[in-house]
Amino acid sequence: MNKKIVVNTTINGEPQVFLCEPRQTALEVIRETLGLTGSKEGCGNGNCGACNVILDGVLVNSCLVLALELEGHDVLTIEGVADTYEDADLHPIQQKFLEHAALQCGICTPGFIVSTKALLEDNPNPTEDEIRLWLAGNLCRCTGYDKIVRAVIDSAEVMSA
Amino acid sequence: MHAFDYAAPETLDEAVALLTKQDGHVRVLSGGTDLLAQLKDGKGSPSLVVDIKHIPDLMAFTCDASRGLTLGAGVPCHVINNDNSIQKLYPALLDSSSLIGGTQIQGRATIGGNLCNSSPAADSIPNLIAHKAVANVTGPDGDRSVPVSEFCTGPGSNVLKAGELLVSLHLPAPVAGFGAGYLRFIPRNEMDIAVVGAGVSVVLDGDTIQEGMVSLAAVAPIPLLVKEAGEALAGQSISDDLFARVGQIAEDAARPISDMRGTIAQRKHLAGVLTRRTLKIAIDRARAA
Amino acid sequence: MTASPQYRILGSRPPRPDGVDKVTGRAVYGNDTRLPAMLYGHILRSPHAHARIVSIDTSRAEALPGVYAVATGADLPQLADRVEDLRYTSNNVLADDKVLYDGHAVAGVAAVDLGTAEEAAGLIEVIYEVLPPVMDVHQAMADGAPILLSDLRTDELGEVLEGETNIASHFRHERGDLESGFAAADIVIEREFNTATVHQGYVEPHAATALWNADGRITIWCSTQGAFAARSQTSIILQQPVSKITVNPTEIGGGFGGKIPVYVEPVAAVLSKKAGHRPVKIAMSRADVIKATGPTSGSYIKVKMGATNDGTLTAAKVVLAYEAGGYPGSPVPSASGVVLAPYKLDNVQVDGYDVLVNKPKASPYRAPGGTNAAFASESVVDELASAIGMDPLEFRLQNAVAEGDRQANGIPFGRIGCIETLQTAIDHPHYATPLDGKFQGRGVAAGYWMNWGGKSSVSASVNADGSVSLLEGSTDIGGSRASIAMQLAETLDIPYEQVNAQVVSTDQVGYTDLTGGSRTTATTGMAAYNLGQNLRAEMTRRAAELMETEPETVTYENGVFSSNGSRLSFNEVAEQADASGAPIVGTGTAAPDQWGAAFGLHIVDLEVDPETGKIEILRYTALQNVGKAIHPSYVEGQMQGGVAQGIGWAINEEYVYGDDGKLLNASLLDYRMPTSLDLPMIETVLVEVPWPDHPYGVRGCGETPIVPPAGAVANALNDALGVRMNVLPMSPGKVLEQLWAQPA
């Protein structure tokens, strides 16, 4: 074991201090050290999007970021998504995923919701093609994406209304 | 991942000192999208990883019509994709920066890292070559500049010597009549490594191509500048025959291997197809500019 | 079709009980288990496709600080030679004297953290004697092929043959007279097909946590399609009675059949015991998942079919040779039930071969064996229709099976809805919409899956407020908690929201077969119906008591018990019964001996880039007889998901091995599953022909939709370019080669 280093960061709006080894990824620390297991490891090399988080406003694969790289930065995980939307228990994206049955097993769902949040911040009224392109880095094996894309379209409509 | 130490220098001098001291067992961390995937795969076991994202020079870019684009080696793709000045002056660069990995990869991945990773299939390198880009390097022996077309020396290897670091890429200001493009072929519509890629640029004078460049990905041990294609384009007027001829030259110049992503025959064929298609894009952009 | 009954709840689309947890990241999956003093495990895997293990030295790994235990195959009980399948199950979990595929598990390590466990695994020294690998059925069946299992003997039509072999079994189904059948045909077409090995591709890697306690009790938390199946396999491998094993199923991130076998569960248990009874969690990496779990068989298939000029099929002969992987057990038996299923045939012969190759042991994958089989037969059916000059759907309709027609194995079909589905497809607007591009094509293909009944248990208690706590043993992969709760609510005539469904451990509910065979909503739903009937009877009895009358005089309608002018609602009975007497609890079980099969018909439009060979799916319509759709959104979702997997299988997915038998593409970068950008919206048409033996007409719907896509895409490709593909995947490179091989 290498010696551990202190990292100061902000997770879901709260200051967080953790210890980690240089070889630990942000995903490993978020899950195993901080206990935020909503971010999932589907592939470990940036090809499935199940671990997606928003880092300083930018969508990233947390499996391809070292935990040490979070020093001084701001991370939003799935656990923090609902709190970013005022006056609701769930974020409209979460609500629409439920209503459209846009999940089956649900393992990819946190990644999709985080990606969708980043999409709608970047482009509040995306076309179906823009949605499919943006979400191409998020793999879902259950749904064939149909209901996910519909949920995203509906989320955009609700949020921009 | 194998255990390693981590350093995040804030100046180029510090970075060079760290890279020099480590005797080769050091890796530079830019966006990390290639490096971390490789380390997890057991490809390389550095004793030190040097994160260059705290060095201001590497995180900056300047872009204007007179001086061109100077792109810090640590600037991630999403910054390029969202910058109006780059979009306007170098629309073809976005052909690469917007298709490297998915959205979330583009949140971290850098063009500098793509070049230093030196994959023969890298999506940005043929494009950089077609833009006559130059790599600005610093190291223990000072600064030097290397044309991107001469940067890679083999799969995963390049001209950087121990202790050297890519600082920035410089793309010359586009001359009047310039247009470029990059296309790759992949089996899916996203999230794949190029089976073949083609970067093409032209400088048009009316319907005559004054100058042209064709560079190919994944058809040789390094990103290939097809000089014969450039020669064939120079001074020619645009015609179907020219497209066919240049496509054939690219196909002949390609010297790929067969691997799990494609066969020799498929890749040579695609080199021709993509060269023709990208040439069309480059010409259309030149006319629109 | 008879008029369908009116339901209050069935056919509506309420939110699922586990929904909020799954959109907020709160749901606990296999790798999310955290126990006090938990250790992290890692598996060392073979780098060779075929090798004898000469020695394993674990001493350096054991000496690494932070390492608590190392286990190898020698730590598993040695099972008697007679029980071959059980021994194979054990050897697949940790290799015995041989490794049979790249990625075969050789040893496990438990350590204080992941990094230490991985490092320790790297310190285990294994000496291998590398043997030549056998990578497909052609090589494996050839004379003089290297032998994987020296004790394997072929089961040849029920007789055990002498001599070493890689052919585990050969079976045959036949009916009628092939010779006269083909003689009666005006046209006979015979084609050969080869298909690649593919993986289920669930996004959640396998993960399990095990505690082998000091009292001998073993508790496992894992992502599995069946807690009871995981318990019984663990019991066999560890030679511990099921009474000592509890399996707690976590949420499951997809399975598609691949999470029926156990892989890491017994290893985690053994490590836990060796580590001083500390809990050990093992989570696979994606590379582990692709290399050592899943796949479904690559195959060689030969199909010969004959038809008369007026469009009647006269005979069919099929040979299916399926890769089993390193140990016997390919899905070739079920493939034989799919391959000709949609067609009425009097003269038929189907031969199946189960063949060992140096690849991971095949595990079920959604309609196991069906997609490759239907790709072959639906291609030949299409070619016959075209040769005769008939519309491909009309040709299929003319030969469609109906109730009472016999399958190749002689068993007659029950009520199947094949004709209804085909007729709906013919009438569907998609089929009448013109294509509008030079390189566009349209294809159709039929598909069938026999489904499975199995056994299920549920139990429930009625709370004082009238809510019902429902416990079930069926893993919920795609919303089945909702579909089962809906059936209970319908039966009890109470609102859906009043039923709280949970999936519980093997100690908390009666035996329930795994979620597979498209059985859960049907059979566990049937158990819920039976439970509902039992609870209704008990509630009626209690209502009678409260109303001071006899139960026979009490009627129950619209949630209200009535007798002689007295009325008490369900909730009132619950409340008053709670105050006055014993708690109201009930159980329900089901083990149907008949269950509903499902036919589907898919229509696809695609466009091919003739210069690159790349296929773009433009429009897709999946029609299927689903029986009564309990929760239509989840039925549609099953169909859309099956289509997506089928398209992936058709176009890009494949295991790519080097000549040395090493897997080259064990990542989601190069194992190319469809992304959102590769698919259009997938239209579904639910043809609801109820299954008569189910109280609500439910038949399984999850597997059939993966069967037709490869055949439909192949037929559309032929329509677009005039090329017949005889390989899967029909990847761009393969399509180009086929185009180049076409006579100009």
Image (cartoon, coloured by chain):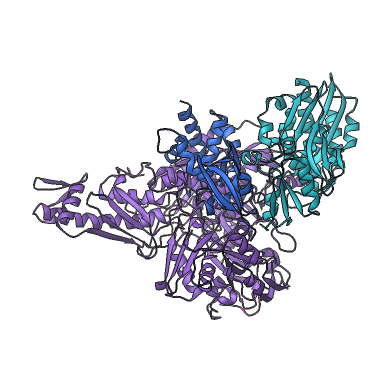
Q: Is residue C664 above or below residue A60?
A: below
* Left or right: B268 in relation to A121: right
For the residue pair C501 and B104, the one nearer the viewer reads as B104
Q: Position of residue C587 (x, y in %)?
A: 29, 60
Query: Chain drawn cyan, letter?
Result: B
Q: Quadrant of the N terminus of chain C?
A: top left
Q: Is residue C163 magenta?
A: yes
Q: Residue at x 39, y 53 (%)?
A: C521
* Left or right: B160 in relation to C338: right
Q: Position of residue C20 (x, y in %)?
A: 41, 44
User: Which of the 4 image quarters holds residue B245?
Assistant: top right
Q: Residue at x 20, y 51 (%)?
A: C574
Q: Is residue C215 above or below residue C442?
A: below
For the residue pair C6 and B151, the one nearer the viewer reads as B151
Query: Chain drawn blue, letter?
Result: A
Q: Which residues are magenta?
A: C161-165
User: Which of the 4 image quarters holds residue C75?
Assistant: bottom right
Q: Is residue C523 magenta?
A: no
Q: Is residue C489 above or below residue B226?
A: below
Query: Chain drawn purple, letter?
Result: C
* Left or right: B180 in relation to C590: right
Report the residue that reaches farthest toward the top.
B206
